[in-house]
Amino acid sequence: MTTDPLWEPPLAGTDAEHLTGTLERLRATFRWKADGLDVEQLRTRAVPSSELTVGGLLKHLAVCEDDVFCWRMSGRPPVTWMSVPEDDVARWQFAVDPDETADDVYGLWAAAVGRSRARLRELVADGGLDQPGHLDFHGDRPSVRRHLHDLIEEYGRHTGHMDLLREAIDGRVGEDPPVDWPMLPVDDDARG
């Protein structure tokens, strides 16, 4: 009998379990595509027609995690860019600066994902996916479910970018990480 990796969505489950499982699978595939690179590889513009880098996408998705889970869903300050000058966030989130290491970039993403997982568990326990988030959008407050769908879409788009970038850097291809790949731990509670 084979055991599914922790990031695999359930075959049958609640809506929260399926959405969380889908997000976890995208996070795992994205992070696996970024895995094991040094800081110069994280900075490499591997596709000539694009400014995107693996490190820039790791930082961008860390910003997205905090924007969605901290700010949009909860009204909390977005931790990832709290120390970045407001007028530099747009540049900063897509660049690996000279003073940053690979560990800094990987750690930034991992910390944001950890906060997001904890916050989603809280939100599901305290009112579920249909409760309104914090963000006011033209007089409406999109639900936690809507924000979760938006983040899934964001990961889907950038996981596709990551496919191209990583293949150009060292030839890594594939849809899913190997079953034994050591992704950040995913608690059973993280699935909803």
Image (cartoon, rainbow, N blue to C red):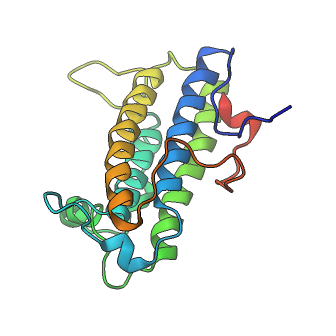
Q: Is residue 163 left or right of residue 19?
A: left
Where is residue 14 drawn, in percent x and y?
65, 15
Where is residue 170 drawn, in percent x and y?
41, 67
Up/down of 54 relative to 162, above or below: below
Q: Is residue 123 left or right of residue 166?
A: right
Residue furthest left in the image: 49
User: In the rendered image, is residue 126 in sight?
Assistant: no
Residue at 27%, 68% (x, y): give it. 95
| Nearer the observer, 157 or 33 | 33
Up/down of 182 relative to 129, above or below: below
Up/down of 123 relative to 184, above or below: above
Where is residue 8 drawn, in percent x and y?
64, 33
Up/down of 40 relative to 6, above or below: below
Residue furthest front in the image: 171
Residue 87 picture quarter: bottom left
Quadrant where the N terminus lies?
top right
Residue at 36%, 79% (x, y): give it. 40
Residue furthest right in the image: 1
Quadrant where the C terminus lies?
top right
Residue furthest bottom in the image: 99
Residue at 68%, 23% (x, y): give it. 10
| Nearer the observer, 102 or 36 | 36
Residue 96 picture quarter: bottom left
User: In the rendered image, is residue 4 in sight?
Assistant: yes
Query: Number of callouts in the render?
Result: 0
| Nearer the observer, 28 or 93 | 28
| Nearer the observer, 9 or 88 | 9
Residue at 39%, 51% (x, y): give it. 61
